[in-house]
Image (tube, coloured by chain):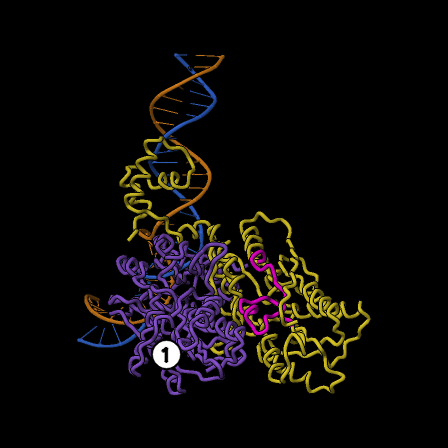
Chain colours: A yellow, B purple, C orange, D blue
DNA sequence: TATAGGTAGGCGAACGTTCGCCGTGATGAG
DNA sequence: CTCATCACGGCGAACGTTCGCCTACCTATA
């Protein structure tokens, strides 16, 4: 049951309920004997503080909002389990919990959910994921001085808290490796323009090629949503090119896309890793068990989750003075597909 | 901002703050003119009720706890995104939110997290996932009369709320299909004993074989954790058997395991779908893009999520009189791997 | 005119905490 | 003997709601 309140404990211990509060919160001074009586009574009644009451008093909610993009019943984006788990774990250790909500609108133009949750004091701050170029949420939260941390930078040079993994560097490593292996016609399957993360990764592609004195054929670039299908469509497109124009390697901006690309390549009768090189990005669990195992880029995702959580909590409890930014380095994982 | 309280609105509208509350909650009677003034003031001050205060008053938290099994930093189990999203979506529509917490112990023997969260009135109920045989959480929550719904039955015949997908029927369909295709030596890669879900699926395997007059060789059963590796190890084990004893088909209790099995089969030089049949269970996104595409079982997971959420909310707001149980039917999805 | 009933809105109380101020009695220093 | 100090713990107030009771007025009916 555990319905006992401070007053119940106080009655049992023969003191005022405020004194019980003091003892349990280790403030104020009480004689050892009184303390013993109080603690004993609390234990016996199986007392637990009512968090809701505590929160009202302290004007907080000890809850962090985490948006689940696209709230329709049909379309939704899977969250990164690993990242999220680390965030939850880190917050919990400091007495905070994560609560999910679904943003109503794919484009995030609808900021109502954020305004509502914070306005009603239902959450103390937000964690943003999947930030887009010129993300309106960031402008809004910044203007309203609402605590938040973004996992993923945006183009604009605004001074807010973020953690990101250097996608430029990741793809740079990939292309560098492919060049070393002798590839010269290297294609890229990426997301639609507007995804900041995508833009960043693309830069790595262009830069490394430029350094090698290679001007990529525009037909080598294929764009789509972050679905397996996109990879498949990309390869079909690339193989529709005249033979001499076809790439020998395909760089994908996600493992998801790479899986589709591998699938389509096999359907074209190609042997991946031999007739064609394909690389991914993320190193999802399944990557090493694909056939052939996927060469990909691994992000320090645990570290990112922990950083994001800690940065947010610092903001929330006011120990952060100026916004912080952290850029983490990913690493190349070489397997059979390239 | 939005720091306006009822009192602020009341002052601006020239009424008592309780009257404002009445108007905003559509109780009590006020003249149209007063109502107009109040609503206008509320709008102008951008008033939002403080959820924490509401919760204190109404003795609830409008939060549902969702455990993330195994809270260590290293080991954790991915949650089913699709199920969870539907749960979040359904709850949100009724003004409830989902809060994550990490259970400290793999075995769930540690019930402290549940006791704490509910004892402190931090959540109004729980959603249980990944139930185990004789799950101590269920006994505990039942004994304490704490509202909860389990996604997954348990063996014991206790009267509590659950939603489950008939794993017996799912695997029955799989084996039935394999028999139709002429297979007679059919292996099973399953989880460790103790997982209720696994037990259930196994029954489908044994029953359908028995109906066909086949007694499965004990060496055809391989067990492990729900990881890709398990599938690989299983196939390696099966191929270590004398040729005449080797199965021609391998039924896996999850797509995860099936991926590993396919991988190992290919490594053995087998052509999946021809030299050996392999089936999965879950129909994860990637299943149709594997090579060959995976024959698997699809669960009505959206429906399950919605049911679970609604059953819990009914319990929480007291509209449920007797515990309900729902068993959903899965369907077979035939692709190239078998 | 007296009574009843309905309407509009005020008001006290409570939900369970935390915080800071205050009083009392004992102790020690001058 | 007096006064400051300190340990102990009581107490009022506040956080922002909701709920139910109460009052004052207005109108219709007998």
Residue A17 percent coordinates (x, y): 33, 41
Q: Which residues are magenta?
A: A279-304
**Residue at point 41% right, 77% down?**
B244
- Residue A50, visible in the rendered structure: yes
Query: From the viewer's perspective, is A252 left or right of B167?
Result: right
Q: In the rendering, at what x and y percent does residue B260 appear?
A: 49, 71
Q: Quadrant of residue B1?
A: bottom right
Where, quadrant-wise, is the C terminus of chain A in this rendering? bottom right
Residue that sits furthest to the right in the current view: A213
Q: Is residue A122 visible?
A: no
The residue indicated by pointer 1 is: B170
- In depth, the one of B282 and A179 nearer the eye is A179
Magenta includes A241? Answer: no
Label 1 element class: helix
Left or right: residue A46 versus residue A165 is left
Above-or-below relation of B218 to A150: below
Q: Position of residue A16 (x, y in %)?
A: 32, 39
């Amino acid at each position: 049951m555990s319905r006992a309140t401070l007053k119940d404990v106080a009655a049992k211990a023969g003191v005022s309920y405020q004194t019980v509060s003091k003892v349990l919160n280790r403030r104020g001074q009480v004689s050892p004997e009184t303390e013993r009586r109080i603690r004993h009574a609390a234990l016996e009644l199986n007392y637990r503080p009512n968090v809701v009451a505590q929160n009202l008093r302290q004007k907080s909610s000890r809850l962090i909002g985490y948006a689940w993009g696209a709230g329709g019943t049909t379309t939704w984006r899977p969250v990164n389990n690993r990242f999220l788990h680390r965030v939850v774990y880190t917050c919990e250790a400091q007495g905070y919990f994560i609560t999910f909500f679904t943003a109503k609108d794919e484009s995030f133009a609808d900021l109502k959910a954020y305004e509502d949750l914070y306005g009603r004091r239902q959450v103390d701050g937000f964690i943003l994921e999947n930030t887009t170029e010129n993300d309106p949420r960031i402008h809004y939260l910044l203007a309203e001085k609402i605590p938040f941390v973004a996992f993923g930078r945006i183009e604009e040079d605004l001074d807010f808290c973020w953690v990101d993994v250097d996608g430029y560097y990741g793809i740079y490593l990939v292309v560098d490796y492919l060049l070393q292996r002798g590839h010269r016609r290297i294609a890229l399957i990426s997301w639609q323009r507007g995804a900041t993360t995508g833009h960043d990764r693309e830069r790595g592609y262009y830069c490394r090629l430029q350094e090698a004195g290679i001007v990529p054929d525009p037909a080598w670039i294929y764009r789509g949503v972050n679905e397996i299908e996109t990879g498949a469509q990309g390869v079909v497109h690339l193989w529709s090119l005249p033979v001499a124009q076809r790439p020998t390697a395909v760089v994908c901006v996600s493992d998801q896309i790479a899986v589709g690309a591998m699938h389509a390549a096999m359907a074209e009768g190609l042997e991946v890793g031999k007739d064609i090189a394909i690389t991914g990005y993320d190193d999802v669990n399944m990557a090493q068990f694909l056939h052939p195992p996927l060469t990909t880029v691994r992000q320090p995702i645990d570290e990112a989750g922990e950083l994001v959580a800690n940065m947010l909590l610092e903001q929330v409890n006011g120990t952060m003075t100026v916004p912080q930014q952290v850029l983490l380095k990913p690493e190349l994982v070489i397997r059979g597909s390239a």
